[in-house]
Amino acid sequence: MATATFTRVRKQSTAPRRENVEILRAAVFHTPKNPFHFVDALAASPDGAIAIHAGRIAAAGDYIAVRAQYPDAVVRDLRGGCLIPGLVDTHIHFPQTRIIGGLGYELLDWLENLALPEESRMADTSRARVVAREFVHGLASHGTTTSLVFGAHFTEATAELFDAAHRKGLRVISGLVLSDRLLRPELHQTPEAAYLASKTLIERFHGLGRLRYAVIPRFALSTTEAMLEVCQTLRRETPSLSFTTHINESPAEIAEIARLFPWAPDYLSVYEKYDLVGRQSVLAHSVHATGDELKRLAGHNGSVAHCPCSNAALGSGIFPMKRHLDANVRFALGTDIGAGTGFGILKEALQSYLMQRVAAEPLTLTAAQLLYLATKAGAEALSLDSEIGDFAPGKAADLVYLRPPHGSTFDTALIHAEENPERMLASLLTLAGSESIGEVRVEGDVVYEGKP
């Protein structure tokens, strides 16, 4: 299969015809620059606008300036609400949609008692088809336009996820989950079968519309070295594939890795041996990484999926954000459904803020940093930042319109923020849930509309 490319920003030699431009007028917030590095990273317009042409951002900023640029464009007046880039979830499990809310467990017990029995049910393709529809609806209805998704351990169930995402119009990167030990027997594949099934799915879905394929060993605990060699082979054969798995989530998991791979000095080295860590790699959790692992991860230019709700729900620990920042390791947000507490990336941003306030090395995150983690940081982690993540002209018009329900606390807070951009954004991040999602677009196409 030829190597695919996915950076499709269109360089326009002339301005779009004005009669074909649509303007959305509302408060606009996005982070064209990284607010962990730049104090002026937040672009905010309390009376703002986004101009859209052919599914792309034509202009974004203050309404008067955008309107002057396209005086003949059709304007939708959405004042009273806010426009932000489409949310990005860098770690989520499709087969676990129906077990959200399993409280009182730690990681390995939760897997044994809740996650793995439910994932075994994905052998029923008709059930997987229904769950896939529920899953993509959950993404869209919470403003998630792009996600890196653990598929199922079954080929047809994983195909059902891809089909549902394609019909919905979402950007989804996913793949068959590979394991050959220490899980339930029905979740195991032989390395040979895993390779053949993965190749079939890659040929069918990688590069189809807004879909991409990822190589996904569940974690080193459930994969032999032969299966990790399969992962290495798949990525060498198709270098444009993404890679994702788990790392350093809980102390018990790390101890088991040391037993299973006695030659490995640490968890990361298991994946390094098979050339699985690089620019297109996202490793979930990284709660208990050593300093040397972080240094090496940064050297590989890999990324981490930070899942604060899941980390707290399973008692795994508090993500050491300051250590990752100091080591120059990229990270973005993930919901980690079903150990996580829901589809809301905005909730993960708020939980991240709360957890970092009480971390061993505390940080006080700004509203701009939280918005960045929920949007552009995810685009960067998934190597999609030339296509999505902010409202720079030429990028895809992936966006979320948040409209506070009349009389809600969010409505009250937004009204009394007095057009102070930081306060308005902080209110949004603290109070906006799925009930506030008015419209969600991917490349200009409406993929979800909330109740009026």
Image (spheres, rainbow, N blue to C red):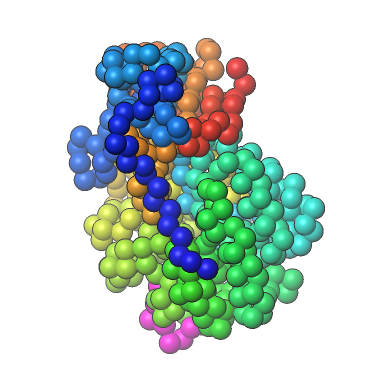
Specify whether residue 261 is painted magenta.
yes
Q: Left or right of 91: which side holds 424?
A: left
Q: Residue furthest bottom?
A: 263
355 vs 145, nearest the viewer: 145
Q: Which residues are magenta?
A: 260-269
Report how many numbered discs are placed on residues in the image.
0
- Position of residue 105 measured from the top left corner of the image (x, y, whole percent): 61, 56
Specify whether residue 195 is painted magenta.
no
Q: Relative to 100, is 197 above or below?
A: below
Residue lying at 53% horizontally and 27% vertically, measured from the top left: 439
Residue lying at 76% horizontally and 62% vertically, measured from the top left: 123
Q: Relative to 112, is 405 above or below?
A: above
Residue lying at 52% horizontally and 73% vertically, measured from the top left: 234
Quadrant in which residue 227 is drawn: bottom right
- Position of residue 213 measured from the top left corner of the image (x, y, whole percent): 53, 60
Q: Quadrant of the C terminus?
A: top right
Viewer can see residue 201? yes
Q: Left or right of 382: which side holds 182?
A: right
Q: Left or right of 445: which side holds 390?
A: left
Q: Relative to 198, is 13 above or below?
A: above
Viewer can see residue 379? no
13 vs 98, nearest the viewer: 13
Quadrant in which residue 341 is drawn: top right
Residue lying at 49% horizontally and 21% vertically, measured from the top left: 403
- Position of residue 258 measured from the top left corner of the image (x, y, whole percent): 47, 80
- Position of residue 339 measured from the top left corner of the image (x, y, whole percent): 58, 52
